C-alpha cells in the first residue's frame, strides 16, 4: 500500500510594500602605477600637440599678414642711411644745393619726420630709394652737422621688389608732380633718360612721357614733350635749362621746328656768353622765342632797345624761431612776406607801424 504525499497550502503575503535589495556594487578595479603613468603621459602629449597646432596657426597667420602688409608697402622700419642707394632710377630733381632744405631740416629736428621715405629691398641687403630724396638729403645733412645717433637711420616704408621699373618710376614721379618748384626741363630730362634705357622697352620720348606722367593732365604732358624736344635740339648749349619758364620753352621749341637753321644761330649766341647767369640765358632764349633773333644780344648789365624783359627775380626763404613758434619769411625784389601763427589784425595799427619802422631802421643801419 503506497503512502500518499500530503500537500500543504501556504499563503504567501504579497511583495508589495517591500523594497527589493540592490545587489552590492562591485568596487572599482584599482589601476596600477604603470597604467596611471601611461594615461597621464597620453593626456600630456595631446595637450602639447594642441598647443603646438595653435602656435603654428598663429605664426602662419602673422606671416601671411606680414607678407600682405609688405606687398602693400605698409611695413615701416628705420633703415641706416648707409644702406640706402640711388642707383636704379634716374632722378627728376635738378642737381645742386636745395635752397629750401634748411626749412625741412629744422622741421625734422624739432618735430621729427612725419612722412617716411619709401625704399625697395634689394637682394644684396641694400635698399633702393623710390620716394623721398629731399628727406634723405636732410637726414644726411643733419647727421653731418649734429653727429646725433637719431640721424644715423631714417624711417622708411619698405616695398618688396616689384620687378617692374615702371612702377618705381611712377611712384617717384607722382610724388614730385605736386612740387611747385619742379621745372618742365627736369621732367623732360627724366623722360629722355627713361626712353634711352633699352630695359624699359620705351624707345620714343613721347611714349615715355605717356608712361611716366600718366597722372598728369594732357596739357602738362604736352609741355613736357615740348621741353624734351627743346633739350634734344639744344643739348649741351644750355647752361641753365631748369630755369627756362614754361612759355619760353614751348614757344622756342615751336620756333626752332619751323626754322631748323635757327638752332645753330641760337647756339652761337649762347656760346658768346659762356659765363652767363640763369637770368641772362632766359633773356637770350626769350628773344629767339619771340622772333627777335636779329636784335643785338647785349651783355649783362648793359641796356638797349631790344632789352625790354625784366630779369628773373631772386628769392630768399628763411625761418626765425621765436618762443614756441616759427616765423616763415620769403624775401624777393620789393617784397617781404611773413607768416606766423598770430592774428596781426588784432594788434593796434600804431604798434604795427612802430614795429615796421624799427625793422626798416635796422636794415638801414640806424639801430
Image (cartoon, grey):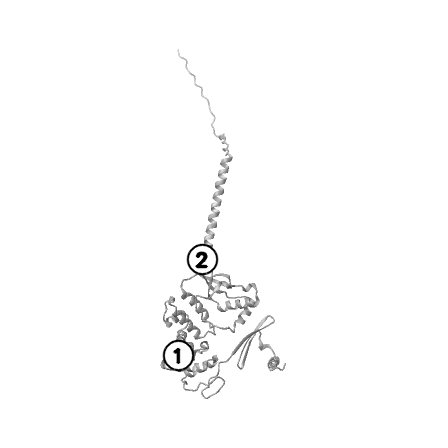
Say above or below: 2 vs 271: above
Residue 169 location in percent, x, y?
42, 67
Secondary structure category for the residue under label 2: helix
Disc 1 crowd, CA 10 A, few/some/many (<14, 14-19, 20+) = many
Residue 173 relative to residue 108: left or right: left
Q: In which quadrant of the rendered image does the C terminus lie?
A: bottom right
Classify mark 1: helix, strand or loop: helix
Residue 210: x percent and y percent? 38, 71
Quadrant location of residue 70?
A: bottom left
Can residue 289 be seen in this snapshot? no
Disc 2: CA contacts within 10 A as few (<14), some (14-19) or many (>=20) = some
1 vs 2, front mark: 1
Rounded to the nearest angstrom, the CA distance separating label 1 from label 2 is 49 Å
Image mark count: 2
Q: Is residue 146 visible?
A: yes
**Residue at x 49%, y 39% (from the top left corner):** 39
Residue identifier under label 2: 67
Left or right placement of residue 103 versus residue 282 in this view: right
Task: Specify whether 362 is left or right of 310.
Answer: right
Residue nearest the viewer, comparing 84 with 346: 84
| Residue positioned 42% across, 76% down in the render | 236
Q: Are marks 1 and 2 in contact (CB under 8 Å)?
A: no
Q: Quadrant of the N terminus?
A: top left
Q: Residue furthest right?
A: 367
Q: Which mark is residue 253?
A: 1
Q: In front: 164, or 38?
A: 164
Give coordinates of residue 84: x percent, y percent.
48, 64
Amino acid at each position: 500500500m503506497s503512502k500518499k504525499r500530503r500537500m500543504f497550502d501556504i499563503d504567501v503575503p504579497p511583495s508589495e510594500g517591500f523594497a527589493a535589495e540592490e545587489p552590492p556594487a562591485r568596487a572599482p578595479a584599482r589601476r596600477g602605477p604603470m597604467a596611471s603613468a601611461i594615461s597621464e603621459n597620453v593626456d600630456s602629449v595631446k595637450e602639447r600637440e594642441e598647443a603646438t597646432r595653435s602656435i603654428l596657426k598663429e605664426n602662419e597667420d602673422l606671416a601671411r599678414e606680414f607678407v600682405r602688409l609688405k606687398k602693400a608697402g605698409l611695413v615701416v622700419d628705420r633703415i641706416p642711411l648707409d644702406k640706402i642707394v640711388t642707383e636704379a632710377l634716374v632722378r627728376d630733381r635738378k642737381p645742386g644745393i636745395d635752397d629750401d632744405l634748411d626749412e625741412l631740416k629744422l622741421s625734422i629736428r624739432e618735430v621729427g619726420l612725419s612722412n617716411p621715405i619709401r625704399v625697395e629691398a634689394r637682394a644684396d641687403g641694400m635698399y633702393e630709394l623710390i620716394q623721398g630724396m629731399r628727406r634723405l638729403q636732410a637726414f644726411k645733412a643733419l647727421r653731418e652737422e649734429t653727429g646725433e645717433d637719431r640721424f644715423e637711420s631714417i624711417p622708411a616704408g619698405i616695398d618688396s621688389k616689384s620687378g617692374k621699373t615702371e612702377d618705381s618710376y611712377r611712384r617717384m614721379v607722382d610724388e614730385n608732380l605736386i612740387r611747385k618748384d619742379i621745372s618742365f626741363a627736369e621732367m623732360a630730362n627724366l623722360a629722355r633718360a627713361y626712353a634711352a634705357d633699352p630695359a624699359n622697352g620705351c624707345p620714343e620720348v613721347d611714349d615715355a612721357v605717356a608712361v611716366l606722367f600718366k597722372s598728369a593732365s594732357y596739357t602738362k604732358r604736352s609741355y613736357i614733350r615740348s621741353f624734351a624736344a627743346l633739350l634734344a635740339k639744344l643739348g649741351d648749349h644750355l647752361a641753365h635749362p631748369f630755369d627756362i619758364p614754361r612759355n619760353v620753352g614751348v614757344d622756342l621749341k615751336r620756333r626752332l621746328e619751323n626754322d631748323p637753321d635757327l638752332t645753330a644761330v641760337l647756339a652761337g649766341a649762347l656760346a658768346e656768353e659762356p659765363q652767363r647767369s640763369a637770368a641772362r640765358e632766359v633773356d637770350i632764349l626769350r628773344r629767339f622765342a619771340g622772333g627777335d633773333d636779329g636784335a643785338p644780344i647785349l651783355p649783362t648789365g648793359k641796356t638797349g632797345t631790344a632789352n625790354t624783359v625784366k630779369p628773373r627775380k631772386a628769392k630768399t626763404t628763411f625761418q626765425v624761431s621765436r618762443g614756441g613758434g616759427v616765423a616763415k619769411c620769403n624775401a624777393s625784389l620789393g617784397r617781404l612776406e611773413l607768416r606766423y601763427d598770430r592774428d596781426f589784425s588784432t594788434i593796434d595799427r600804431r604798434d604795427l607801424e612802430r614795429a615796421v619802422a624799427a625793422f626798416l631802421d635796422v636794415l638801414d643801419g640806424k639801430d
